[in-house]
Amino acid sequence: QVQLVESGGGLVQPGGSLRLSCQASGSFFSINDMRWYRQAPGKERELVADITRGGTTNYGDSVKGRFTISRVNAKNTLYLQMNSLKPEDTAVYYCNAAVIRRATMSALGYWGQGTQVTVSS
């Protein structure tokens, strides 16, 4: 009933930029916190950045100063602007959202399918 779809991934050279999007759709009351995670081969999934509904942001140490998380609540959309990309940023990036369901008015976590980001020359 709730779907999160990421887009914007691809191949980029070191130092380049990409902007990821996460579009939420379906039937729900609202979305509270939203997060970007990433997972590289052989590594655990790690939190990249999070943002509250009110716009308060936090970032993982490895991306501070390079990535910017944002959202447009009216569009149910989450963004991740990634600048100064490094090879170590290569991973599948996942959108995560705390969704308030209409039926229960309680929050459940949902995941997107992921979008591949590859930083390589």
Image (cartoon, rainbow, N blue to C red):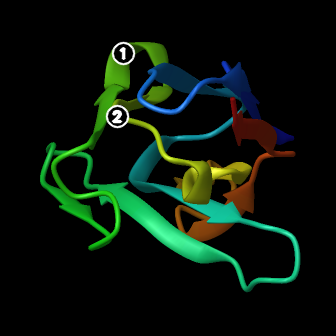
- Against 6, residue 46 (above or below) is below
Location of the C terminus by quadrant is top right
Give whichever of discs 1 and 2 has the lower sequence position.
Answer: 1
Which one is nearer the viewer's eye here, 116 or 104? 116
How packed mark 1 is, by other alpha carbons closer than 10 Å (few <14, some 14-19, many 20 or more), is few
Question: Residue shown at 80%/39% (left/top)?
Answer: 116
* Image position, residue 2 (x, y; %): 78, 41
Which one is nearer the viewer's eye here, 34 or 82? 82
Looking at the rendered structure, the kind of residue marked 2 is Ser
Task: Examine the image and state in which quarter residue 120 appears.
Answer: top right
- How far is mark 1 from mark 2, CA to CA? 29 Å
What number of labels is visible? 2
* Image position, residue 29 (x, y; %): 52, 41
Helix, strand or loop under label 1: helix
* Image position, residue 104 (x, y; %): 63, 65
Task: Examine the image and state in which quarter residue 4 appears.
Answer: top right
* Image position, residue 14 (x, y; %): 52, 33
Helix, strand or loop under label 2: loop
Q: Which mark is residue 83?
A: none
- Toward the front, the furthest residue is 121
**11 relative to 47 in the view: left or right:** right
- Residue position for label 2: 84
- Residue position for label 1: 74
